[in-house]
Image (cartoon, helix red, strand yellow):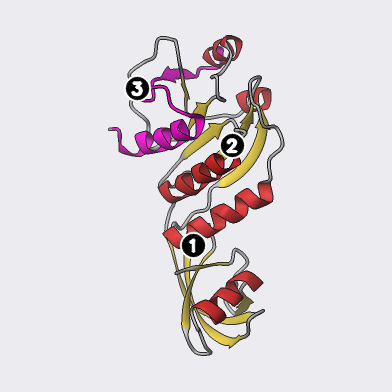
């Protein structure tokens, strides 16, 4: 298992109290043991335990490697009322690996209050377990503000409208927007078309919002 510390340094640094407890109590780590640490920004750090207790763990930097992020995909998705299903989405999308997740508040969004701290903690844990080297950025945004963002390829999952057979562009910054349960409104769809979004079909069936988000990320990675 890897540990997470975005504030590492090339000298001494500390693990979080939660990670220190896990290393001490669960993994039975002791001084001089070597740990693998991730920072969520592409670095794999090797560090040696200098001291460890159930509440703290001091590490001595040894070496690190850097890997360039391959995914340039943003998933913009409307939060849903069922918290457990949405947390499952965050876990899977972090495992798959995307650049950014935008919690998109639309006309039909049913849940406008989200627990960003809990969501980020879930993503941290998933990143450590999956050893994904990049932690997706997680932000909230209103629909109108989202339209002002710049992307090289802009797509949205569309129901009940003619879609296009499009291949994802893996070399440029792309976004796929997923509407709330009940889909984007007709007005929102027309506005997205005016902002150069292109509609795509996400399979042959009507998908739940969180399923559509996972499907879109996998589609973007695998469809050539």
Residue of label 1: 128
**Which type of secondary structure does the marked residue at label 1 adopt?**
helix
Identify the residue at horizontal 47%, vertical 86% (top origin). 33
Residue of label 3: 166
Quarter holding the C terminus is top left
Residue range highlighted in magenta: 194-223
Between circles 3 and 2, the one closer to the viewer is 2
**Location of residue 187 (image quadrant):** top right
Q: Is residue 222 magenta?
A: yes
**Which type of secondary structure does the marked residue at label 2 adopt?**
loop
Residue of label 2: 82
Comparing 210 with 48, the one in front is: 210
Work out how far the residue at label 3 is from the one at label 2, CA to CA, in angstroms: 31 Å
Comparing 43 with 57, the one in front is: 57
Q: Are marks 1 and 2 in contact (CB under 8 Å)?
A: no
Across the whole image, how many numbered discs are drawn on residues?
3
For the residue carrying disc 3, how many other residues have a C-alpha within 10 Å: few (<14), some (14-19), or many (20+)? few
């Amino acid at each position: 298992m890897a540990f997470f510390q975005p504030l590492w340094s090339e000298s001494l640094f500390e693990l979080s109290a939660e990670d220190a407890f896990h290393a001490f109590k669960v993994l039975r780590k002791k001084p001089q043991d070597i740990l693998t640490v991730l920072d969520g920004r592409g670095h794999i750090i090797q560090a040696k335990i200098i001291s460890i207790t159930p509440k703290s763990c001091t590490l001595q930097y040894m070496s690190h490697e850097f890997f360039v992020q391959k995914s340039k995909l943003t998933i913009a998705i409307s939060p849903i009322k069922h918290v457990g299903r949405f947390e499952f989405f965050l876990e899977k999308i972090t495992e798959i690996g995307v650049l950014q997740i935008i919690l998109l508040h639309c006309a039909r969004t049913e849940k406008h209050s989200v627990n960003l701290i809990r969501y980020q903690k879930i993503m941290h844990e998933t990143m450590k377990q999956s050893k994904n080297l990049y932690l997706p950025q997680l932000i909230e945004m209103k629909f109108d503000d989202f339209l002002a963002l710049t992307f090289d390829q802009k797509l949205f999952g569309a129901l009940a409208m003619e879609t296009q057979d499009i291949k994802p562009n893996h070399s440029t910054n792309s976004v796929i927007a997923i509407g709330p349960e009940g889909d984007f409104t007709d007005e929102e769809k027309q506005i997205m078309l005016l902002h150069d979004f292109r509609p795509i079909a996400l399979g042959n069936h009507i998908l739940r919002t969180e399923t559509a988000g996972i499907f879109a990320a996998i589609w973007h990675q695998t469809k050539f």
